[in-house]
Amino acid sequence: MPASEEWDREIDELFAAWTEAGKRGDAAALVSLTTEDAEFWTHGAPAVKGRQAVTAMLEGFFAGFRFEQSFEALERIVLDGWAFVRGIEHNRVTPKGGETVEIRQRAFMVLRREEDGRWRFARGMTNLEARPANPR
């Protein structure tokens, strides 16, 4: 199998592992899918920098919420151990004891293939999609 096909398969597996760990509320598994120097920018929130900060954010989040996420890739560029992925996140967030909220947002991610041969999320940026104006 050519490296490009193998890398595409491994990246698909990374996204699948992220989805499954999120459904389980498994912060440790999610953190293992990020690089040590990971940095994530979320709409309207401060940047989350490094695995320690990612761990704290996820543990705090899963203490109060259940989460399901899927990702619709619109573009993927893979080159020399780096992948750039652009698409739409579909999130279902349910407060424990509350009602589910669905959130769609644009997402751009940078993945890095590390020395152990595993792909991990290195950078991420999301932005809520614009909502249509309410007609009067």
Image (cartoon, grey):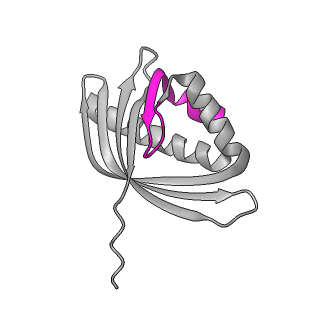
Residue sitting at 52 percent across and 31 percent down? 33
Please give left or right for residue 61 compared with residue 12 in the image: right
The magenta stretch is 26-47
Which quadrant of the figure contains the N terminus? top left
Instruction: Residue 77: tell me if it is visible.
Output: yes
Pick the residue in front: 8 or 100: 100
Quarter of the view holding residue 26: top right
Residue 108, horizontal then vertical, whole percent: 33, 42
Residue sitting at 56 percent across and 30 percent down? 54
Residue 45, horizontal then vertical, whole percent: 48, 41
Pick the residue in front: 110 or 52: 52
Residue sitting at 53 percent across and 41 percent down? 17
Question: Residue farthest to the front?
Answer: 136
Q: Is residue 88 magenta?
A: no
Residue 56, horizontal then vertical, whole percent: 64, 30
Instruction: Residue 26: tell me if it is visible.
Output: no
Residue sitting at 25 percent across and 22 percent down? 80
